Image (cartoon, grey):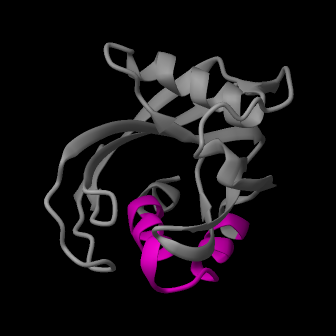
């Protein structure tokens, strides 16, 4: 079943959406039933937060989703993959930035680490560490994060894909 969700940012004051950002994220199975999850630390226009998020990022103009996913996973984690299954998408917004997002999610398998992360983008630099966790451990981490701001927006966006595993 393909997941399709439309979410509203109720954590920050409404703002006119200036652009739409297309992104991809991976539930990357790097060991049997164990997945990558980033621990994010930020102190910026969203506020000061520690939370968890799946690897991934922006799709460049004209870039196929799987090409973007391979690039983002390699940059952020050093992993490549051989198989991908489309899980669905979430449309949401970040009022703070004035962005609407459409994020496509994939389960990726046949993962192999071939290099250290290269942290190319500003968003990459928010990654404090990357964990390898079971589904249950990842869900506990997500549930244990703060219940406001960006942490809440990310939890709402990503929980359905963990539940689908």
From the viewer's perspective, is 119 left or right of 97? right
x 58%, y 50%: residue: 54
Residue at x-position 66% and y-position 31%: 120
| Residue 147 position within the rendered picture, expressed as x and y whole percent measured from the top left | 49, 86
- Horizontal placement of 155 versus 75: left or right? left
Give the left or right position of residue 162, taking residue 97 as reference: right
Locate residue 40, reporting x and y percent.
Answer: 66, 61
Query: Residue at 27% of width from left, 65% of height from top?
Result: 95
Query: In terms of image quadrants, where is residue 76?
Result: top right
- The picture quadrant where one finds residue 83 is top right
Q: Looking at the picture, how far across and down is residue 70, in whole percent?
A: 58, 22
Residue situated in front as seen by the camera: 130 or 112 = 130
Name the chief secondary structure element in magenta: helix
Q: Residue furthest front?
A: 45
For residue 126, above or below residue 85: below
- Residue 106 visible within the image: no
Image position of 56 with respect to 38: above or below:
above
Quick check: 86 left or right of 74?
A: left
* Range covered by the magenta-colored residues: 137-159
Residue 19 appears in the figure: yes
Q: Is residue 157 magenta?
A: yes
């Amino acid at each position: 079943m393909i997941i399709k969700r439309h979410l509203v940012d109720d954590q920050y004051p409404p703002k006119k959406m200036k652009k739409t950002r297309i992104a991809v994220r991976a539930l990357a199975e790097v060991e049997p039933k164990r997945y990558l999850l980033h621990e994010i630390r930020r102190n910026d226009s969203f506020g000061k937060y520690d939370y968890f998020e799946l690897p991934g990022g922006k799709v460049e103009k004209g870039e196929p989703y799987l090409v973007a996913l391979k690039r983002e996973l390699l940059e952020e984690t050093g992993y490549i993959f051989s198989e991908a299954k489309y899980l669905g998408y979430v449309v949401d917004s970040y009022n703070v930035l004035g962005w609407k997002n459409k994020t496509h999610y994939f389960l990726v398998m046949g993962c192999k680490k071939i290099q250290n992360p290269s942290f190319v983008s500003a968003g990459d630099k928010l990654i404090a560490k990357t964990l390898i966790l079971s589904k249950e451990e990842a869900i506990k981490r997500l549930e244990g994060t703060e219940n406001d701001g960006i942490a809440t927006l990310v939890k709402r966006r990503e929980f359905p894909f963990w539940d689908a595993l």
